[in-house]
Structures are given as C-alpha cells and as structure tokens.
Image (spheres, rainbow, N blue to C red):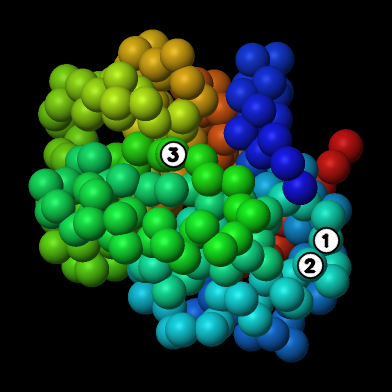
Amino acid sequence: MNNLLKNIIDTADKGIKQLAVLIDPDKMRIETVSSFIAKVNQSIATHIFVGGSEVDDGLTETLIIELKKYTELPIILFPGDVIQITDKADGILFLSLISGRNPDYLIGKQVEAVSKLAKTNLEIIATGYVLIENGKETAVQRVSETKPIKRSDIQLIKDTAKAGELLGMKLIYLEAGSGATHPIESHIISEVKRQLNIPLIVGGGIKTKMALDSAYNAGADLVVIGTAFEDDETFFKKLKKP
C-alpha cells in the first residue's frame, strides 16, 4: 500500500475527516481479532494504528499478520519502541517526541531504528509528537521520562507544534495519552490548527461521539480512538458507516 501520507493530506484538504482505531498489541487477544475488526470495517474508521508504550517483542508482527486477514484498511505502526517495527504493516509514524527534552525520544530511538527500517518497504511518515498533560501520569510519560506540556500553556503547545512543522515533520500528533481522563480541549486544537499547514492528528481521552465531533469541529484532520473501543465496543454502533 503506497501514498499513505498523500492520501491523508488529500483527504484533509477536501475537508473529509479521518478516524484511526489504535490497537495495542499487548491488550488485543489474537482470538478476538476477527470479531473486533468486523466492527471496525463497518465503522467510519479510515486507518488502523498499531502500537503501545510497552509491548513484548514479536507481538506487533503477530497481531498485524492476523489483522491483515480481515481488513483492507491501511495499517500504520505507532511504535513505542524499535522492537515494534515490522514490515508486515503498510507504514510507520516516525515519531519524535518534540514536547519532551529526552534526546533518546527526540532522535536517539530514531537513529536506532534506521537500520531496521532499511530492511522494510514501510512508508515512513515523519511525525511530531506533542504530549499534553491530562491529570495523571501516562505510559508515554513514564517510559520516555519526559513531562507533558501543561494545557494552560497554549503558546508553548502552539510553538512546539509549529517548530515540528518547520523542522520538516509531515504530521503533528497532539496526544493526551492512553486512558486520558479527558480529551484535549477544543480551543487548544483550534489554536494549534491555525498555526499549521500540515495535517493535525488528535488522540487521547476521546470516549464519546460528542467528544469526537468536538475534535473534528475544532480542526483535527484525523482523530485516534483506542481505549474507548477497548472499554466499550458498543461505541462502534455510534460510528457505523451511513
């Protein structure tokens, strides 16, 4: 599958909103994949993201092989570590945690990944990852040993996102973290979106159709939902294709 980034950009330029279902290999049981993906296929989801902050070696590839049996949606790696890289996916968000100041997650892990990526045909999409505080410590915060940006510091959030674009990132990902107590507020999303000339991804804490629509209306081009589907698969019924 080619032109993942081009398709995301073209779709965003047309004003069509996109939805990614994030699947954590550490939480998805192989025997439940077929029934879960059947619901995804019936929904408005446009992408599947696969990854987690802490995933055992080999789980990601095993899961993606199984996913490919049941869906034609593009599968994009959202890796928390180099061991999650597999050529069984279609592409990878090549993340740099630009909200943090730990060099390992700004550039170190990326350098470590290069030799492994060279052996794949993955489409590599440079993505600026901006972690926003949500009231509790997230796995990303713990693993990366970085602090999220405070929600009240909107100027820093905007400047960080824009810096990512100016550095050459192709996407900006605003993240409240897995299991966030509440999503990123609409005014933050809209302020960031006004700064950017590249697509904006928003994820974390989106657990209702109202929260999803709010993110879209504020300017998110692609929204990522994970925990909401893990905790309540009936959420799919609210997101069925028309």
The amino acid type found where label 3 is placed reads Ala
Quarter location, residue 129: top left
Q: Is 65 placed above or below 158 here?
A: below
Where residue 132 sits: x, y (%)?
Answer: 26, 43
Residue 141 appearing in the image = no
Residue pictured at 62% horizontal, 24% vertical: 9
Image disc number at residue 126: 3
Please state if 52 lies on the left or on the right of 10 as rendered.
left
Q: Which residue is mark 2?
A: 68
The amino acid type found where label 2 is placed reads Lys
Q: Which residue is mark 1?
A: 71
The amino acid type found where label 1 is placed reads Thr
Work out whether mark 1 precedes mark 3 in sequence or the reverse, and give the earlier one.
1
Q: Is 97 placed above or below 229 here?
A: above
Report the Cα–Cα distance between label 2 and label 1: 6 Å
- What kind of element bears circle 2? helix
Q: How many marks?
A: 3
Please state if 197 lies on the left or on the right of 133 as rendered.
right
